[in-house]
Image (tube, rainbow, N blue to C red):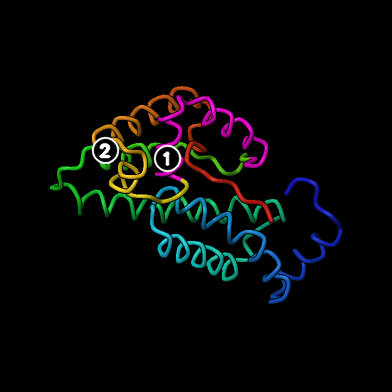
Amino acid sequence: MSNNTSFELDLFLSFKEGDETAFKFFYDQYFRRIQSFSFQFVNDQDEAENLAQEALLHLWQNRESVASINGIQAFLFTYAKSKCLNLIRHNKVKDKFKNDLLNQKEKELNIEVLNSIQFDTLELTELERIIQESISDLPPKTREVFIKKRFENKKNTEIAEEMGVTLKAVEAHMTKALKILKTKLSDYLFLIFILIYNN
């Protein structure tokens, strides 16, 4: 929130003083974005909702430590980042004996992405166009697989059936997409998988 209105600034001051109505304003403004961010890494809708709620509750409990209205976004995303990392690492250990190389690669890349995030200088909405253009530039079938997997939350078997291709072909397209995006978005690595929502 770079161009804050006096209304928002007044709400921030009220929020700092413990006004629950003011908190609800920021809750509604950020919940969907935190949920979306978390989902792209944990790939579980219920877990992503829990993480978003937990992040916002943590914000409320620590509201006195947020120095400015612009610090709310950094606070929430930093907390969500930490929780996502913990969950991914936990699941990686849990799944280490499973023979699913693609999932392991995704978990490793997710950890790399999350570790690279610096939310204090992050301007999510300004980079949305760059990310969308990079996804649009993927080869057609690779792009379709990536969107179905990452944004429609479909399993590899579902994608293979819908597209009339083999499971190995789906895995190959995802691996290709990850490799291309990682290279193309190296300067914006932390945003590869974020689906941005505004109000």
What span is colored magenta in the figure?
123-150
Look at mark 2 in the image and give the residue it sits on.
102
Q: For the residue marked with disc 1, what is the amino acid?
A: Asn
Near mark 2 (Cα within 10 A), the count class, few <14, some 14-19 or many ≥20, is few
- Percent of width and height locating residue 160: 31, 41
Residue that appears at 56% across and 33% down: 131
Residue 5 sits in quarter: bottom right
- Percent of width and height locating residue 115: 42, 40
Name the secondary structure under disc 2. helix
Residue that appears at 57% across and 71% down: 61
Is 186 contained in the magenta span? no
Image-based side of 18 in relation to 46, left or right:
right
Q: For the residue marked with disc 2, what is the amino acid?
A: Leu
Image-based side of 68 in relation to 5, left or right:
left
Near mark 1 (Cα within 10 A), the count class, few <14, some 14-19 or many ≥20, is some
Look at mark 1 in the image and give the residue it sits on.
115
